[in-house]
């Protein structure tokens, strides 16, 4: 396999924007999350190739020019980091909303043909090295083949611009609805396989007990979640003054409603929830006129169509409380 010089060797990330900074529907690139376990490889487009192999009719190798000749799709999708694989239940709210541009993975797979025995799509990046004391080799993730909708992209644009280097230049996978960890950056290899890959990112990390506590599942689909953007934590608001509490809600499963509590979770009211825009996050809003003075914890919780609710604590999609002061 080709090896690449790295701009950064070892873990690299950007401090995530706080929820009250996520005021834009489409998050500007410099406020988006950045997370690189193994560093940042430098990949000139002239050298880049994507090979597609494993359980396919015939292997394919695409150059940058080949890729650009294929039809381009753009879509909006929320993009959320599952948090550190070493601390997976910590609710980090590392999230943004992005417009991606690229080629449908399905269009490329149609050209090489998929063997019916294939059950997983492996994706490997050009970055390699060690993470948390483990020599990882390359970064390889998988998605179940049933998840190969037309929204899975070989993306080369973020918000209308080429991908930034740390965010996968020149090409990354984007799997809308799945946690960011599955959207492999600096993508160089796609492989169809019967089983899950055996590297540390699919065995040692990024597997967890499901909510029912009865099975270990891969960290794939994003659980229902919401954050309050406004008011910001610790804001003062006047008694009897009406303010709008608003924020974003998202999840792999469609969200049916968002509830807001202005009494630390004792009672909940339905917020207004806008219609979905692609796979993007959705704005919710509710008016509130506090009648009593003092400190208050505002909360929002998303409810998915299945009835699955954002929990109060204990999981990465736990409710994000916002303390405010009524004066
Ligand atoms: N090749 C590669 N792809 C990767 C990673 C990585 O370390 N290497 N990190 C993953 C994780 S955990 C996340 S959250 C997203 C972050 O994407 P971003 O940096 O563009 O926001 O990339 C994913 N894709
Ligand atoms: Mo992540």
Image: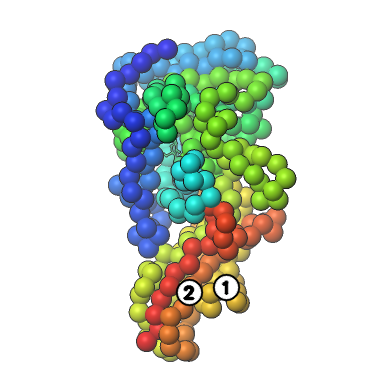
Q: Is residue 314 left or right of residue 83?
A: right
Residue shown at the point (55%, 19%) measured from the top left? 191
Q: CA distance from mark 1 to mark 2?
A: 8 Å
Q: Residues within 10 Å of mark 1 (few under 14, many from 20)?
A: some
Q: Report which residue position mark 2 lands on.
A: 297
Label of residue 265 in the image? 1
Q: Is residue 26 left or right of residue 46?
A: right
Q: Is residue 68 visible?
A: no
User: Looking at the rendering, which quadrant does residue 244 occupy?
Assistant: bottom left
Residue shown at the point (38%, 30%) measured from the top left? 38
Q: Position of residue 250 (x, y in %)?
A: 53, 54
Residue shown at the point (50%, 26%) measured from the top left? 140
Q: Position of residue 106 (x, y in %)?
A: 57, 27
Q: Position of residue 324 (x, y in %)?
A: 41, 76
Q: Position of residue 238 (x, y in %)?
A: 37, 86
Q: Are marks 1 and 2 in contact (CB under 8 Å)?
A: yes
Q: Residues within 10 Å of mark 2 (few under 14, many from 20)?
A: some
């Amino acid at each position: 396999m080709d090896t690449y010089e790295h701009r950064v060797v070892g873990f690299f990330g950007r401090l995530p924007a706080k929820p009250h900074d996520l005021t834009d529907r489409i998050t500007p690139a410099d406020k988006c999350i950045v997370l690189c376990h193994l560093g940042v490889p430098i990949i000139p487009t002239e050298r880049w190739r994507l090979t597609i192999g494993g359980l396919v009719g015939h292997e394919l190798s695409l150059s940058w020019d080949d890729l650009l000749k294929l039809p381009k799709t753009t879509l909006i999708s929320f993009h959320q980091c599952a948090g550190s694989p070493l601390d997976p239940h910590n609710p980090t709210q590392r999230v943004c909303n992005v417009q991606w541009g690229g080629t449908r993975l399905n269009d490329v797979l149609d050209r090489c043909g998929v063997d019916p025995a294939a059950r997983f799509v492996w994706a490997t990046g050009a970055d390699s090295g060690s993470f948390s004391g483990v020599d990882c080799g390359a970064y390889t993730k998988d998605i179940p083949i049933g998840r190969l909708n037309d929204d899975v992209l070989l993306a080369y644009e973020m918000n209308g611009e080429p991908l930034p280097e740390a965010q996968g230049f020149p090409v990354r996978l984007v799997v809308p609805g799945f946690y960011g960890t599955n959207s492999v950056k600096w993508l160089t290899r796609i492989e169809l396989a019967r089983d899950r890959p055996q590297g540390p990112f699919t065995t040692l990390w990024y597997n967890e007990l499901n909510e029912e506590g009865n099975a270990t599942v891969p960290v794939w689909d994003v659980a229902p979640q919401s954050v309050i953007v406004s008011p910001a934590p610790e804001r003062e608001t006047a008694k009897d003054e009406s303010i709008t509490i608003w924020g974003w809600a998202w999840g792999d499963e469609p969200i049916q409603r968002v509830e807001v509590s202005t009494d630390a979770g004792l009672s909940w009211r339905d917020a207004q929830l806008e219609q979905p825009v692609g796979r993007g996050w959705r704005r919710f809003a509710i008016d509130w006129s506090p009648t009593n003075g003092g400190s208050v914890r505002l909360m929002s919780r998303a409810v998915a169509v299945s009835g699955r609710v954002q929990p109060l604590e204990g999981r990465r999609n736990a409710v994000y409380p916002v303390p405010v002061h009524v004066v």
